[in-house]
Image (tube, grey):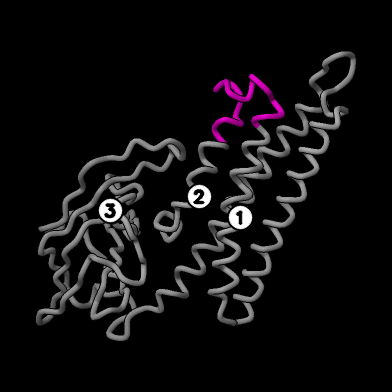
Amino acid sequence: MPAMTAALTEPVVKFDPYQLKTTAVREGDEYVLNGSKTAVPLAETAELILVYANEDGQTQAFLVPTSAAGLAIEKKAKLMGIKGLPTNLVTLSDCRVPAENKLGGADGIDFGLILNHSRVALGAAAVGVARAGYEYALDYAKQRVQFGEPIGHKQSIAFMLADMATDIDEARLLVWEAAWQMDLGKDVTRDVTLMKQRVDAIVVQVADRALQVLGGYGYIREYPVELWLRNARGFASFDGLAIV
C-alpha cells in the first residue's frame, strides 16, 4: 500500500469545500487538474495525493502520484501546534491523471458523506485533547499544595474544573449523537455542523483552563498543557487534515 495523503483546503480567503477553485476537466481518457492546495499533511513523504477538485460544480476526488508532471510540493508551513503532522502547499499546473484515477468511477463520490465522517472523527479527537488537559489539571490540583491545602480545595479552581468536566461531557455527547445518527443512515449534516462548531470552542476553552489551573507552570514547555492548548487552537482549521 503506497503512502497516501489528501489535499482539500485551498489558499483562498473564503474557502468552501463544495465550491473548490481547483478544477478537474475531462480530456479523452484523462483528467487535467489545475489549482493550489494548502495544509496538505505529510505531502513530502506521500506517494499518492487524493486531490479534491471541482468537476462541473461537484467536488470529486482524484488519485495523483506525487511524481506526476505538473504537481509540485512547495512551501512547508510552520505550524503553531500539531508538530507531528507537517503540512505543505501543493500546486497543480495542467497535471494529467488517467480517468480511472477518479474515485468512485464515472459516478464519483458523495463528498458530503466523506466530509461528515471526517468531522465526526475530528470531533472525537478534540474531545480527547480536552480530556487530556482536564485530567492533567485535575491531578495537578489535587497534588499542588498552597497555604496548607491542595489548590483543588479552592472554589475558584474547583468550579473551573467542574465547568471543564461539564463542557467535555457536552462535547462527547454531541460527537456520539452525530456518530449514532450517521450509523442509522440519516442525513447528519446539521448534527455534524452544530457538533463541530461547539466542540471547536470547547476544546480551546478547556485547554486554556487547564493552563490556568497550573498557573505559571502552565506556560512552561516542560508541562504538556501548553502543547494541548496550541493543538486545540488548530481544530477549527482542521477539516482539510481530518479528511485524510
Q: CA distance from mark 2 to mark 3?
A: 17 Å
Q: Which residue is mark 3?
A: 11
Boundaries of the magenta span: 211-228
Which is nearer the N-term, disc 2 or disc 1?
1
Q: Which residue is mark 1?
A: 199
* CB within 8 Å, label 2 to label 1: yes
**Residue 163's quadrant in the figure?**
top right
Characterize the magenta stretch by its predominant secondary structure.
helix
Amino acid identity at mark 1: Val
Observer-nearest of 121 and 156: 156
Residue 50 vertical position relative to residue 58 in the rendered view, above or below: above
Mark 3, secondary structure of its residue: loop
Which is nearer the N-term, disc 1 or disc 3?
3
Residue 113 vertical position relative to residue 120 in the rendered view, above or below: below
Observer-nearest of 183 and 138: 138
Mark 1, secondary structure of its residue: helix
Q: Which residue is mark 2?
A: 235
Q: Is residue 88 left or right of residue 117?
A: left
Q: Which numbered circle lies on residue 124?
A: none
Q: CA distance from mark 2 to mark 1?
A: 9 Å
**Image location of residue 64, percent across then percent down:** 23, 63
**Image location of residue 162, percent across then percent down:** 80, 43
Q: Which residue occupies the extreme bottom position in the image?
A: 107
Q: Residue 162 in magenta?
A: no
Which is nearer the N-term, disc 2 or disc 3?
3
**Residue 138's quadrant in the figure?**
top right
Amino acid identity at mark 3: Pro
Residue 237 vertical position relative to residue 20 in the rendered view, above or below: above
Give the residue drawn at x 77%, y 50%: 166
| Circle 2 residues within 10 Å: few <14, some 14–19, many ≥20 | many
Amino acid identity at mark 2: Phe
| Circle 3 residues within 10 Å: few <14, some 14–19, many ≥20 | few
